Image (cartoon, rainbow, N blue to C red):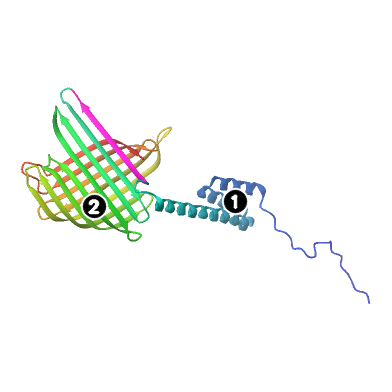
Amino acid sequence: MFRAFTLVPLGLATAAPAAAELAQPVRAMIDAAIATGDEAKVRTVVELAKATYPADGAEIDTLHKVFLDAKAEEKRLAEEMRLENVRQAGLLDNWRGRGELGASRATGNSEYIGLAAALNLTRQGIDWKHQLRARADYQQDRGVTSREKYFAAYEPQYRMGSDVFAYGLLQIESDRFQGYDGRYALSAGVGYQALKTPGLNLALKAGPALRYTDYTSGELDTRLAGLLGLDFDWTITDGVKLTQDTNLVAETGGAATVIFDSRNTTLALVTGLEARITGKLSTRLSYAVDYQSDPQPGKIGTDTLSRVTFVYGF
């Protein structure tokens, strides 16, 4: 009995057909995008590569996943380093701030000089946030002082949850043209982070307050009060071309604080529009309203102030 044999070329009987490797131009294109480290750019290139070479989708996805995993690990390590630096920082470390300055002078039929200055400092910790704010407005008309207002505040905040925080506030003001040499407020309460996105930030707070006022008449007044506060920032646009080599970033930002007691309610409202000139230098147009429901005799209850200033961030 004879058996039939079929001759098969060596190697083909035991090996399955090998999958074709990703085309070199496609791999080079993806590698070039990955080298930039830009996740959006890599995602766009990967989508185009998969649309052009659908049979190689699995290998393209693998390359994309390796890149995303590496970026995630890089961010995790950077966040760990940041938190460790915050834990090790001294009392005077990690403060960021903004200085604001504007001045005006006129001669001729009207002679006056004016000065507006402000300083904001913030220290962001893991659970604690500290804010220091100071502002001064001064104007002299024909040698006579016509405006002299000073303000300073310190506000610590403790984060109790992702959106809830506790706050404390010590606030000092002086405005003898409104009828007081010194007005001091001490408050503590809770706040809520209503909105927090890259372009919009809104925080609300409320609590009891103690207010002490030293009037220019010599009268002293201490009262229990309540405080309502609002802080907001809104980036309108980014990357609007102002000149060939200067970008404009327009932002609105402001704060409103209401302190009310049985005698007097005060409202401090500041709204501003800010345009970035360079990385750290901006111009700011602001409008401030100071309202007193029960001003001193002979005084007007509402003061407004418009300012154009330069702002430097550090």
State the image quarter where residue 167 is shown: bottom left
- For residue 169, which numbered disc appears in the image? 2
- Which of discs 2 and 1 lies nearer the camera? The answer is 2
Numbered mark located on residue 237 in the image: none
* Mark 2 crowdedness (10 Å alpha carbons): few <14, some 14-19, many ≥20: some
Q: Does the magenta stretch include residue 97?
A: yes
The kind of residue tagged 1 is: Ala
Q: Is residue 30 above or below residue 140?
A: below
Seen in the image, is 153 located left or right of residue 220?
A: right
* Residues drawn in magenta: 94-107
Q: Which residue lies furthest to the top in this view?
A: 108
Residue 146 screen position, x and y as percent: 14, 34
Q: Does the magenta stretch include residue 105?
A: yes
C-alpha gap between disc 2 and disc 1: 56 Å
Q: Which of 286 and 47 is in front in this view?
A: 286
Q: What element carries label 1?
A: helix
Quarter of the image where the N terminus is located: bottom right
Q: Disc 2 on helix, strand or loop? A: strand
Question: Residue 129 at x, y = what percent?
Answer: 32, 52
Residue at the farthest right position? 1
The answer to which of 121 and 69 lies nearer the viewer is 121
Q: Residues within 10 Å of mark 1 (few under 14, many from 20)?
A: some
Q: In this rendering, would 39 be left or right of 129? A: right
Name the residue carrying label 1. 49
Residue under the point 53% across and 51% down: 43
Q: In this view, does 104 lie above or below 91?
A: above
